[in-house]
Amino acid sequence: MTTDVHQLDDGAWISVNDAREVNVSDLWLLARSDFCGCETTDFLAEGFVEVGVDHPDIQARIAGQCIACGASGVTDWLTVGRVVDPDVGEFYGVVPESVHFPAKRTRLARPEE
Amino acid sequence: MPSKVENWKDEVYGNEIRDHLMEFAEQGWEAIPDDEQDAWFERFKWWGLYHQRSGQESYFMMRIGTPNGVIEPGQLEVIGEVAKEYAQGPAENPEFGDAYCDWTTRQSIQLHWIKLEDIPEIFERLESVGLSTQQACGDSWRNIVGCPVAGKDKHEHVDAWPVAQELNETFKGNDDYANLPRKWKVAITGCDEGCGQGDINDLAFEPAEKGGELGFNVRVGGGLSRKEPRLARSLDVWVPPEQAADVAHGMSALFREYGDREDRFNARIKFLVDEWGTEKMRSVLQEEFVDFELPTAGEDMRDQYTYNTGTQAGHNDHVGVTEQPDGNYYVGLNVLVGRMGADDTLELAELADEYGSGEVRLTQRQNVIVTDIAEEDLDEFLAEPLLEDYSPDPSPFMRGSIACTGTEFCSLSIVETKNRQVRYARWLRDNVDLPADHDEFHIHLSGCTASCAQPQIADVSLRGMKTRKDGEPVEALDIGLGGGLGDDPRFADWVAMRVPADEVPGAIKNLVENFKELREERAVPEGQRGRDGEAVERETFRDFVEARDEETLADLVEPEETDYEDPYMHNTKMTWYPYAEDDDMGASPAPTDGQGQPLASDD
Ligand code: HEM
Ligand code: SF4
Ligand SMILES: [Zn+2]
C-alpha cells in the first residue's frame, strides 16, 4: 500500500493513512535554517502548507513564526515522522521539541495528491 | 491538479452526502472505513458537522444556520432541548456546565460533543420546526447574515429580511451551487447603520438609492482569514430588491467557474478580486453570468453607519432596549462570549413566548435579541432573573467581548479562548474604568489566524500565539488596536506581539489609563457643536489609535502581571480537553460508541 498523506482543515493537521498524526500549535526547534536570524528557531507551527513523502520520511512545509524574534513565514521541508514499512503503514512521529534541520528538497518526493 | 479535497467532492458532495451520513449513523461510528474517514469528515461539513479536534475523535461540532439570525417562534425551545439531550460530552466546562449553545459571529448556532449515532434523531427534531444544518459548513453558500433587526428597525430603508429569505430558499440545497471552490459568505442589509458587516463577507448587498428607488449596492471579496484580511470592494453595481437573487446567482456561478480549485489557500473570492480587479470582475459578471444590463452603483448610506464604528453614538451593537416601528420593543441581551447554558436557553425561549412573539434573533456580536415586546410588558420583562446574567445594560467589557471556539474543540487553535475571555471580561469590569464618554469597547479574541472572532475589527484585537516565560512555553496573544467598521472601516494595527496571556488584562488596563491621560481635546467651533452643545470634543479610542503610529502605540500597551489569574497558560491544545480533571491526551475516552463508551482505538 502507498502511504497516503495530506493536510486538512486548512492546514490544521497532517493525516497519514487517514489518522491524525501531526497537529498545529506545537513548538519545533529548527537549527541550521535560514528561517530567521536566531541561532535556533523557536518555531510555532500554525499551519501545514505542503506535505509529501520521501520514503521513509513524511515531510511538510509549515507556516508559523519564531517566537523568539517574531519572524514569520513558511519553513523549508521538515521531516515530521516516518512510515518505515509502507505495507504496515505505521507512523512514527518525531519529537517536535528536539532539534530539526529543514532542507530544500534534494530528492524528488511524491507530492501531495 | 485539483486538490485532494476536490477529488473527494467530485465523488460525493452536496445533498447526497445525507444518505451516507444517515447510514453511518445507523450503523455506528465504527462503520466508517478507516481509510475513508478523512474524505467523509470533509464531506460531512456540508451537512453542518465538523469533526472535533485531536483527542476528541468521534465527536462533532454541529452548526445550525439561522438565516439573518432569525430564530422563529418555537425553534429556540427545540435548540435548547437538543443541546441538553445530545450536546453533552465526557467532561464538563467549568464556566458553562455540561450542555450549552454557542451563538456565533455569523448568526448561527453551534453545539458540541455531538455523536454520529444521534444525528438522525437530532435532524428530525430540528427539521420538525424548520431548522437545518444544511450547508452550515463546507464549500457552498453559508448562512446568510444581515442586520439582526431587519424588519423591526426604524433605521431600515429596504426590508432585507424577505430578500434574505429568498436567497436562503434559492441557494440552500441548490445543486447548481452545492459544490463551490470554497465557502461562500453573503451579507445583506437594508438599514443605514451598517450592521450587516458586509465589508467582511464574500458578497455583500448594502442599501443604496438609485433614480429614487431603494435597492442594494454590491460589494465582493471581503474576509479576515489567515493574515490576509480584505475589505469587500465595490463592484459598481446596483440592484433592486427583486433582482438581488439574479446577481447572487451570477456572482456565485462566477466563483464556481473561476475560483481556484487547485489551492484551497488561494480559493476564496477575495483573492480572485485581488487578481482581477473589480472592473474585470464586473465585466465577466455582466458578460457571462447575468442576462440584463447591470446598473452602476447607486448612492449608498455608508456615511450614516454607526455600527462598530467606535464613535460612541448610535447603534454600535444591538444590546439594550429599542422601540420598533410598530410601537413594540426589541431587547438585546448580552451573552458573554456567545455561550449560553442549555437551561438558560430554554428559559429564554419561555420568556420570548411569554413577553414577545416567541421570536429570538442572533447578532454578529454573539448576542441575542428578544423582539416584539409590548411597551406595557417591558418593565416586567426587564425584571426577569435571567436578565441578571444576560444583561441589556452590561459593563462595556462584558458587552464588547467576543471569543471563538479555541483549543476547547478546534483543530486550528493555538490557545484557549472562551473561558479565558470570560475571566478577562470580569477582571476588566472590576478593575478598569473607561472614560465616561465610552460605553462601547470591543475586545475580540481569536485562537488562531482564521479569525473566527473577527479580531481585526475590534478596538482591542487578540490573536492566539505562544511565548516563553522563564524558559517554559506558555499561551500568549498578539495585541492589535483600533479596528472597526463603518464608512471608513479599518483593520487593527498589530502593535504588541506574543504577550503572555496572564499579562494581557494588565496590558489593557495600562493602555486604557494611557489613553485617558493622553487623549486630545479640541474646541468645537460654535456652528459645529452637536446636540449636546459640548464646547470641547475628546478623541475617541479609535481616533486616538488612528492618529498615532505603531511605535507610539506599542509603548502605551504595557503588559504586566496583576492579580488576574489565568488557569490556561499550559498549552491547552496538548490536552484532550483543557478542563478535564485528568487532561492528559492519553486519558481521553475518545473515540466512543453511541453510548459514550470508549472504543478500542486501532491506530
Ligand atoms: C471547530 C471549530 C472551528 C473550525 C475548525 C473553524 C475553522 C475556520 C477556518 C479554517 C476559517 C478560515 C477559513 C477561511 O476563511 O479561509 C474560519 C473562518 C471563520 N469562522 Fe470558523 N471555525 C470553527 C469555529 C468557528 C466558530 C465557533 C465561529 C463563530 C463564533 C466561526 C466563525 C468563523 C468566521 C466568522 C470566520 C470568517 C472570517 C472571515 O471573515 O474570513 N468559526 N473558521
Ligand atoms: S479562530 Fe482559529 S481557533 Fe478560533 S475557532 Fe476559528 S479556527 Fe478555531
Ligand atoms: Zn528567530
Image: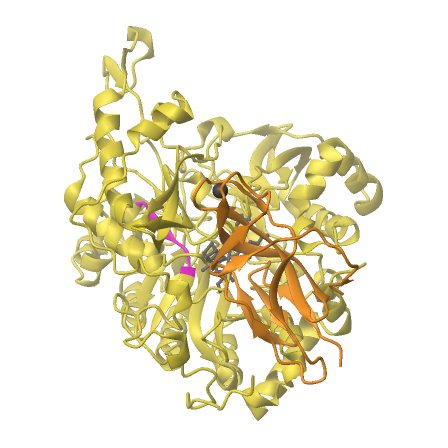
Chain colours: A orange, B yellow
Does residue B590 sit above or below B595 in this rendering? above
Specify whether residue A43 is in view: yes
Residue A7 against residue B12 in the figure, above or below:
above
In the image, taking residue B434 as reference, residue B135 lies left or right, namely right
Which residue is pictured at 62% across the width and 78% down the height?
A: B37
Residue B541 on image: x %, y %: 32, 29
Q: Is residue B370 visible?
A: no
Residue drawn at x 70%, y 51% as measured from the top left: A104
> In the image, A10: left or right of B558?
right
What's the residue at 44%, 53% (across, down)?
A: B105
Nearest the viewer among A60 and B356 is: A60
The image quarter in which residue B307 lies: top left
Front residue of this view, candidates B31 and B473:
B473
The residue positioned 54% from the left and 39% from the top of the image is B199
Q: Is residue B389 magenta?
A: no
Tell me where residue B149 appears, x and y as whole percent: 42, 49
Q: Residue B138 in the image: x percent, y percent?
A: 62, 63
Q: Is residue B391 left or right of residue B60?
A: left
For the C terminus of chain B, the image quarter is bottom right
**Where are the magenta residues, as a range?**
B400-406
Nearest to the observer: residue B94 or residue B552: B552
User: Is B86 in front, or is B494?
Assistant: B494
Query: Could you say where residue B121 lies in the image, as x and y percent from the top left?
Result: 49, 85
- For the N terminus of chain B, give its image quadrant: bottom right
